[in-house]
Amino acid sequence: MPTPLLEIKDLHVWFSVFKGFLKVLDGVDFVVWPGEKVGLVGEMGCGKTTMMKAIMRILLMPPATIRKGEIFFKGRDILKMGQGQLQEIRRRKISMIFQDPTAALNPVFKIGTQLRDVISCTRERGKSMTKGDIRRRAIQVLKEVSLPDPERILENYPIQLSGGMRQRICISTALVSTNELLIADEPGTSLDVTIKDQILRLIGEVVEKRGTSVILISHSLGAVRNMTDRVYVMYAGSMVEAAKTKSLFANPRHPYSQGLIAATPKLTGGGVGKGVPGRIPEYIDPPTGCRFHPRCEHAMPICRDKKPPFFEVNENHQVACFLFRDNQSHR
Amino acid sequence: MQNKMQTKLARTKELSRRWESIHRNWYKFSRNPLSIVGLVLVCTIVFIAIFAPYISPHPESAGKFVNFSDTCDPPSWGHPFGTDRFGRDVLTRTLYGYRYSLGMALMVISIMGPTGIILGLVAGYHRNTWVDTVIMRVTDVFIAVPPLILALAVCSVLTPSIFNAMLAICVAWWPWYTRMVYEITCSLKNEFFVQAAELTGASKVHILFREIIPNCAASILTKMSLDVGWVILIGAALSFVGLGAQPPTPDLGTLVADASSYLPDLWWEAIFPAFAIMVAVLAFNLFGDGIDDMLGEEKGG
Amino acid sequence: MESVKFIVKRLAYSVVVLIGLSILMFSIARVVPGDPARMALGPRAPEWAVQRVRDEMHLEDPVYVQYYYWVKGALHGDLGKSLVTRRSVADDIREFFPASLELALYTGVFMGIIGITLGAISGWYKNRWIDNVVRIISYIGIVTPSFVFAIFFVLIFGYALQILPTIGRIPPGVSLPPRITGMITLDALVTGKFGLCLSGLKYLLLPAVSLAMGPLSQEARITRTTLAGNLGKDYVAAERSSGLSERTIMFKYLLKPSLIPTISIYALDFAAIIGNAFVVELIFNWPGLSRYGMNAMLQKDLNAMVAVVMVYGILFMVVNIIVDLTVGFLDPRIRLGEQSAE
């Protein structure tokens, strides 16, 4: 039985605020196999970024606490790792591309400084690099993301560059060392559509070339549909559906997924979709049981009492909804 | 009949919205327990200032009073803060001292606050015209020296009195408000809602007062709260060197000054008024921080 | 090269402001109710002496004529005569300014280093015990006036413990080092008189700390808030996720952006130092320009007062320019804001 590259089991993450706790992640399960491209879709605020930050252990720990759960990377629990092993993971195994490239780059340092420091600390153990080596590597990495005139960019500050360039630099920073897993958090979201398209294509190329696994987070269903093998749908801190991409888009089962997919405007007839009425819940006092039940047309009494586990509808298609208990589909 | 019901409903909704917003503001204010401490202290100080004559044990000590049988007594039950060399009760004089210090601070802020703010508004709104240049150059001139020095200079050319000290502080302090409001106004002027108001023909006065001021309100109110503390401090410094309130007026600074020549023997004469100054500044600092939390933008998230 | 242009522009502008300041100060000085000459010489001086002073100071001419004479004199280095010391004000300034400058410099350096360090420690170890200790100290520092600190220190270190001197700059009877800059510690150091230098430092200690406590606390507070705020920023998370060591992040990537607001308010804090020096120098009998100026104000020595304020205006302007340059150096967003590609 092969081990998954990444496996998150029953993760609970809470944020401490004055009035109590924001129970953001409520028992999340998530798996990525080697070489897989996994998509993660959900509304803004559903906890996608929190989950990713938890994986890399870069959540700010005073407000955030990890109440329960395990995150296995190749069989070892990241949450229990010591600093040395954690650094090893961050430097050579998992990389993250942040959502907002302007915020992700330190504004008062040159690009070159930041990039060189990353290269220097992620170099292979025992291998020494001269300043020249490091600079050459930096230029090489910038060229990989199709940035023109890399020498000049090294001397620039983030404010002197355009949004698209900053996003490419963030990608290049993530790609500096050979990684096994790349987490792309809504790449290109803050940029205009054509540039976003280029960025996504760039990520696709790079991933193909290196054979890295990817977690692609997006609230753009089109991008996810094109680029991923498998998709998770997330709502208010839990996974509601997980399936092979084709299967999900052909036949979404969970009421929320159906609403999400129906809401996407289609060029081929249909116009703008219906949408899902209501809003994501307050995390400080979330709904009991299935967190979607207040907005769900098909809510049953049990939905309020217990949280639905994943039920298998098909091979490779699971839904966390009591409608599918006993593997019966209602639609 | 229908209309009456609707207006009633609207009014109830309005009231409950107001209540909710008060509730929300209170929540934001009280997030930091220190702000509550500040609020309590500020209320206490205001109370003392208003009711000093009624709560002081020996109200006559506040004025010209001499009682040679009780001079230089260390703190005791009859005189919790002791007596000074004229036999006056130090506690009473300290309580009255709050009256003068707070009163002076409030008057200063209520005069130069609005003045500075209006100047800043006008200058910021008429940016890049001669109005802006004149006002801001003058402001820059006043800011060119540290405020205490300017206040000292103005005070020194006038007859020392509490009123002239107030005047001096006004002269030294107003430009800071102008500067702050100017910067906010400049940045707001280009925002869309201002341009929208202009396009629909709103008068300048309307724009200034209904569109721009509410956006400055947070900074202004925070600054005013904090400034009460600073003005008390500057007033104390002025009185300390003799340029402010004159004896026998028990301004807190004068109290410390009078007492300092008799240190370390009559320590209680100096320590308690000094401590009173510190408590006052602390109170308004904490309170001002709370106002900042309540009205300011959400930081982080 | 942009820095040079910037400095030149600022200098030019500052000169304009200083001219305005001189007009302001002059107006204040001439607004004095009563007769300055009479007030300076006292009620017993003979009328002819008072009249002579009035003529010297052109007190009977219209204000703008007086101003003209003053400017003319100032450009030649003649700032009038002090009615108190009976000497040329320019000479007085030359004698007393170095002492105040020395005090201000030591205080400024002390406040900057200690304030930022305490604030940084406080921010890194947010909410642990050291943070709470620093916060309490800084609250006390902010709310206590300098003169209260001064009195307090004099009491404790001067009278009670008797370990530090409280009056003047050097032990009585000791001769000053040869006057190169006028700053005792510097002159003594340069001429090899280390004992004297050390002595001078001891005398500097209490006044400097009294003046520094308030501004130091402000600096610590702002550093702490900024640092703690920046800890939650995305770029710190990104740097962590890239695998940069905690040490690199803390000391390099977090510190620099966090210092910017702190240094921005440094100028204001320095202003607080020079302002409060007027009172503190009086308490310690420090023979500096602030004490001289304070006395001038108390005794209505108008020429001296105007000159002293102008000197401090110039000093403050220089400090402002240095601070602005430093902030521009640290924060490229300010320097290059207009050049951004968007």
Image (cartoon, rainbow, N blue to C red):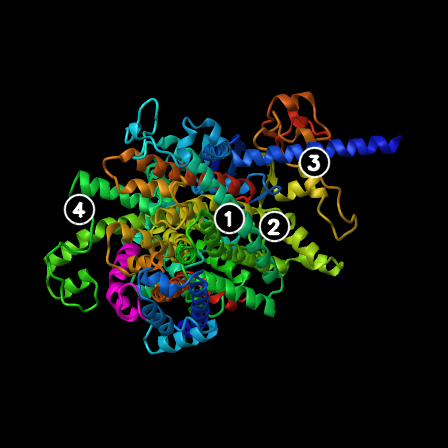
CA neighbours of label 2 inside 10 A, class few (<14), some (14 to 19), many (20+)? some
Discs 2 and 1 carry the same chain letter: yes
CA neighbours of label 1 inside 10 A, class few (<14), some (14 to 19), many (20+)? many
The disc placed on residue B108 is 1
Say what secondary structure mark 1 lies in.
helix
Subunit that carries the residue with mark 4? C
Amino acid type, callout 1: Val
Discs 2 and 4 carry the same chain letter: no
Disc 4 to disc 3, how far (Cα)? 72 Å
Amino acid type, callout 4: Leu
What span is colored magenta in the figure? C81-109
Subunit that carries the residue with mark 3? A
Q: Mark 2 points at which residue?
A: B215
Q: Residue at x 30, y 56 (%)?
A: C108
The disc placed on residue C164 is 4
Disc 2 to disc 1, how far (Cα)? 23 Å
Subunit that carries the residue with mark 1? B
Would residue B28 be visible to someone looking at this image?
yes
- Indicate the position of residue A129 as horizontal and vertical percent values: 30, 60
Discs 3 and 1 carry the same chain letter: no
Q: Mark 3 points at which residue?
A: A278
